[in-house]
Amino acid sequence: MEDKIVNQLQSVLKASVKKNLEKEKKVAVIYSGGIDSSLIAYLAHQSGAGITTFTVGLPDSADIIFVLSIKKKLPFKPVVKIITRKELLKALPQTRKIIQQTDLKPNLMQISLATCLFLVFEEIKKAGFDLVLSGQGADEIFAGYHKFEQFPFSRINQLCQKELERALAIDRIRDQAIAGFFKIKLKNPFLESEVTELALKIPPQLKLKKKGKKTIHKYILRKLGQRVGILKETLTRPKKAFQYSTLIQREIEKITRRQQFCPRPDKLTLGKRPPIGRE
């Protein structure tokens, strides 16, 4: 059964990536070095498109350190941008303004995620790309968050459905708003209906694989990654949310606390930190 599902998933995700490439010869991929963005980058590369991946983060962030360590082994061109505090401070007011123009609440998590995207899109635009692919959506439909471990298998796909609805109502709106500011087309192959419909039928035991006391998240995606030829280092890399793996949320928290003690006319007001719902 496992091999059959991997075959189906490979066929559907490959077709989704190909559709989202839109016959473009030069495409950017937002790349953390994790399984989600790696699958998108590898499948796009194997479809014949010229792929350049973009990774951003503060100097000692997990994504920067990891991607630099595997950079020479990748089959596509990786661009790694180390963000300075000055660049982060410059991006924050514009990011907050973009979020305020949507119906989303400009809380710490939303501002942090939006700022990560703003900085990576800024780099992508400078490099001359108009089409960007992202791995957004994989955590939702393949039970990638640690909180899924709290529930019995019988509830996993129901919870995946709810997470998908949230991603479409919140994450996609935020991401598209930032992309629109840069006049970039952002595509999410994991969120195409053919992929989500298949994912929501996959047995939960193939999403959360129990091995002793450990749980392998997105197990079936890692099996697909193995078949596609993704590096072993990536296949075994644990999940860490974008705003944390770049260290951007940590830095924004520092900036916010400092501004509370040293108010300025352009003070960034983020409000209370929301309850932890995502990694």
Image: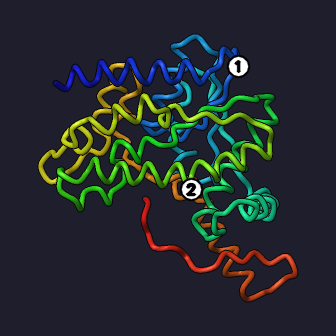
- Towards the viewer: 112 or 79: 112
| Residue at (43% x, 28% y) in the render | 194
Give residue 271's position: percent from left, percent from top: 63, 79
Q: Residue lying farthest left?
A: 212
Residue 100, placed above or below residue 66: below
Q: Residue lying farthest bottom?
A: 261
Q: Locate the N terminus and report the quarter of the image it occupies.
A: top left
Q: CA distance from mark 2 to mark 1?
A: 28 Å
Q: Locate the C terminus and report the quarter of the image it occupies.
A: bottom left
Q: Earlier in the sequence, mark 2 or mark 1?
A: 1
Q: Which mark is residue 170?
A: 2
The amino acid type found where label 1 is placed reads: Lys
Q: Is residue 150 left or right of residue 261?
A: left
Give residue 214's position: percent from left, percent from top: 20, 51
Judged from the image, the secondary structure of the residue bearing numbered disc 1 is: strand
Q: How packed is label 2: few (under 14 Cα within 10 Å), some, or many (20 or more)?
A: some
| Residue at (70% x, 29% y) in the render | 131
Residue 45, placed above or below residue 173: above
Q: Is residue 130 among what the camera can see?
A: yes
Q: Which residue is mark 1?
A: 26
Give residue 47's position: percent from left, percent from top: 54, 13
Judged from the image, the secondary structure of the residue bearing numbered disc 2 is: helix
The amino acid type found where label 2 is placed reads: Ile
Q: Is residue 186 left or right of residue 225?
A: right
